[in-house]
Amino acid sequence: DGGITQSPKYLFRKEGQNVTLSCEQNLNHDAMYWYRQDPGQGLRLIYYSQIVNDFQKGDIAEGYSVSREKKESFPLTVTSAQKNPTAFYLCASSAWTGTPQHFGDGTRLSIL
Amino acid sequence: DAKTTQPNSMESNEEEPVHLPCNHSTISGTDYIHWYRQLPSQGPEYVIHGLTSNVNNRMASLAIAEDRKSSTLILHRATLRDAAVYYCILGDDKIIFGKGTRLHILP
């Protein structure tokens, strides 16, 4: 079955460490997205990519970085510059920007 | 960026219809209206989308006002499994998710 896979489901980070969250899709979608969700809040866009080797900042890109070297993959790195990284991170993909998005099951990141 | 306005929460009785409203007065002519829902600790799930005409699928119906400045998601017969946060968003390059409407279903 086609879908979008995020790993790991839970991730713990020590202070000062960078961590990378994985997102893979086999839907042949051009567009991919990363969102952050804090408890009781809506989703906030971190980065999005409309096509391979291209990506744009969302509303809260500071302290995060991404790459899009392959159509299927859009990893997110949470750097040590992100001062409050504890959150639920969601990856999504769509045929192209503006079309319905398919979401992964999310990665919950916590600071030790 | 185009934005939407939804009530924070709504309640409905099980097996009754639910009408979830959304205002989007700054919608542009090419923006699709999308609805998603999110169950606890899961990613959002696509529900339905439309441009101008009313739309139906197996999950719900979408009624779009003639001036497109508002829309209503209709769940025809609510079940306990429909309790979730429902998001109404506009489909442009930078999709913005607000806080949505938390729907409570009373047994």
Image: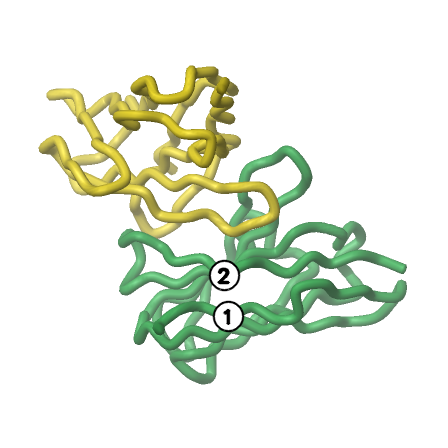
Front residue of A2/B17: it is B17
Decide if residue A19 is on the left or right side of residue B90: right
Q: Position of residue A40 (x, y in %)?
A: 64, 33
Nearest the eye: A11 or A17: A11
Residue type pointed to by label 2: Gly
Q: Which mark is residue B58?
A: none
What's the residue at 27%, 23% (across, down)? Answer: B72
Total number of numbered labels?
2
Residue B74 visible somewhere in the drawing: no
Q: Is residue A95 above or below residue B39?
A: below
- Residue at 42% x, 65% y is A32
Q: Nearer the viewer, residue A3 or A43?
A: A3
Q: Are marks 2 and 1 in contact (CB under 8 Å)?
A: yes
Residue identified by numbered label 2: A104
What chain is the green one? A
Residue farthest to the bottom, as pictured: A70
Badge 2 element: loop
Q: Which residue is mark 1?
A: A5
Q: Where residue A98 appears, x then y in whole percent?
A: 29, 52
Neighbor class of circle 1 (other Cα within 10 Å; few <14, some 14-19, many 20+) is some
Q: Read off the chain for label 1.
A: A
Quarter containing the C terminus of chain A? bottom right
Instruction: Specify the quadrant of the image occupied by residue A97.
Output: bottom left
Residue displayed at 15% across by 36% down: B55
Tag 2 subunit = A
Whether B36 is drawn above or below A8: the answer is above
**Given the image, on which type of amino acid does mark 1 rest?**
Thr
Residue B18 rendering spot, x and y as whole percentages: 33, 20
Q: Please name the color used to draw chain B.
A: yellow
**Residue B100 in view here:** yes
Horizontal side, residue A14 vs residue A105: left or right:
right
